[in-house]
Image: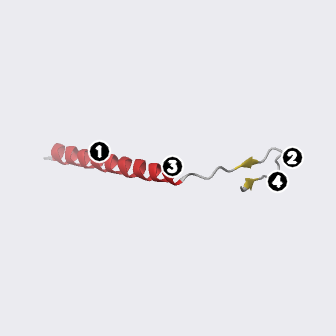
Protein backbone atom coordinates (compact mmCIF):
# COMPACT_ATOMS: atom_id res chain seq x y z
CA UNK A 1 0.00 0.00 0.00
CA UNK A 2 1.02 3.55 -0.66
CA UNK A 3 1.27 6.04 2.18
CA UNK A 4 0.62 9.76 2.15
CA UNK A 5 3.10 11.91 3.99
CA UNK A 6 3.42 15.58 4.63
CA UNK A 7 6.62 17.50 5.32
CA UNK A 8 4.95 18.74 8.51
CA UNK A 9 3.54 15.37 9.58
CA UNK A 10 4.62 13.95 12.89
CA UNK A 11 6.43 10.62 12.73
CA UNK A 12 4.05 7.67 12.61
CA UNK A 13 0.99 9.71 11.56
CA UNK A 14 0.98 9.09 7.81
CA UNK A 15 -2.24 7.55 6.47
CA UNK A 16 -2.44 4.42 4.39
CA UNK A 17 -4.62 4.44 1.30
CA UNK A 18 -7.28 1.78 0.97
CA UNK A 19 -7.82 1.24 -2.74
CA UNK A 20 -11.41 0.92 -3.88
CA UNK A 21 -12.68 -2.49 -4.87
CA UNK A 22 -14.01 -2.99 -8.41
CA UNK A 23 -17.55 -3.14 -7.02
CA UNK A 24 -17.08 0.16 -5.16
CA UNK A 25 -15.76 1.78 -8.34
CA UNK A 26 -18.73 0.49 -10.32
CA UNK A 27 -21.11 1.70 -7.65
CA UNK A 28 -19.59 5.19 -7.80
CA UNK A 29 -19.86 5.19 -11.60
CA UNK A 30 -23.52 4.22 -11.45
CA UNK A 31 -24.19 6.86 -8.80
CA UNK A 32 -22.48 9.51 -10.93
CA UNK A 33 -24.50 8.55 -14.01
CA UNK A 34 -27.74 8.64 -12.01
CA UNK A 35 -26.88 12.04 -10.53
CA UNK A 36 -25.93 13.41 -13.95
CA UNK A 37 -29.27 12.34 -15.44
CA UNK A 38 -31.14 13.85 -12.50
CA UNK A 39 -29.30 17.17 -12.83
CA UNK A 40 -29.82 17.30 -16.59
CA UNK A 41 -33.54 16.76 -16.04
CA UNK A 42 -33.65 19.56 -13.46
CA UNK A 43 -31.81 21.92 -15.81
CA UNK A 44 -34.19 21.10 -18.68
CA UNK A 45 -37.16 21.83 -16.41
CA UNK A 46 -35.66 25.15 -15.30
CA UNK A 47 -35.00 26.13 -18.88
CA UNK A 48 -38.57 25.24 -19.87
CA UNK A 49 -39.93 27.28 -16.96
CA UNK A 50 -37.83 30.33 -17.92
CA UNK A 51 -38.94 30.05 -21.53
CA UNK A 52 -42.58 29.76 -20.46
CA UNK A 53 -42.25 32.88 -18.30
CA UNK A 54 -40.86 34.88 -21.21
CA UNK A 55 -43.88 34.16 -23.42
Q: Which residue is mark 1?
A: 42
Taking depth in this image into account, of 12 and 52 the one nearest to the observer is 12
Q: Residues within 10 Å of mark 2 (few under 14, many from 20)?
A: few
Q: From this viewpoint, which residue is outermost toward the right?
A: 11
Where residue 44 appears, x then y in whole percent? 25, 49
Left or right relative to 23: residue 35: left
Residue 24 marker: 3
Q: Residues within 10 Å of mark 1 (few under 14, many from 20)?
A: few
Q: From this viewpoint, which residue is outermost toward the bottom?
A: 2
Where residue 23 appears, x then y in whole percent? 49, 51
Helix, strand, or loop for circle 1? helix
Where residue 1 appears, x then y in whole percent? 71, 55
Closer to the camera: disc 3 or disc 4?
3
- Residue at the location (47% across, 49% down)? 28
- Residue at the location (87% across, 46% down)? 11
Closer to the camera: disc 3 or disc 1?
3
Helix, strand, or loop for circle 4? loop
Closer to the camera: disc 2 or disc 3?
3
CB atoms at circles 4 and 1 under 8 Å apart? no
Q: How much space separates mark 4 and mark 2, taking CA atoms?
A: 10 Å
Left or right relative to 4: residue 8: right
Helix, strand, or loop for circle 2? loop
Q: Which residue is mark 2?
A: 11
Taking depth in this image into account, of 55 and 9 the one nearest to the observer is 9
Closer to the camera: disc 4 or disc 2?
2
Q: Which residue is mark 4?
A: 7
Of the two numbered discs 3 and 1 on the same chain, state the one appearing first in sequence: 3
Q: How much space separates mark 2 and mark 3, taking CA atoms?
A: 31 Å
Taking depth in this image into account, of 32 and 47 the one nearest to the observer is 32
Helix, strand, or loop for circle 3? helix
Q: How much space separates mark 3 and mark 4, taking CA atoms?
A: 31 Å
Q: How much space separates mark 3 and mark 1, taking CA atoms?
A: 27 Å
Amino acid sequence: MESISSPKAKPGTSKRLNPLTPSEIESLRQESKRDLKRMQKRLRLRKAQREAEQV
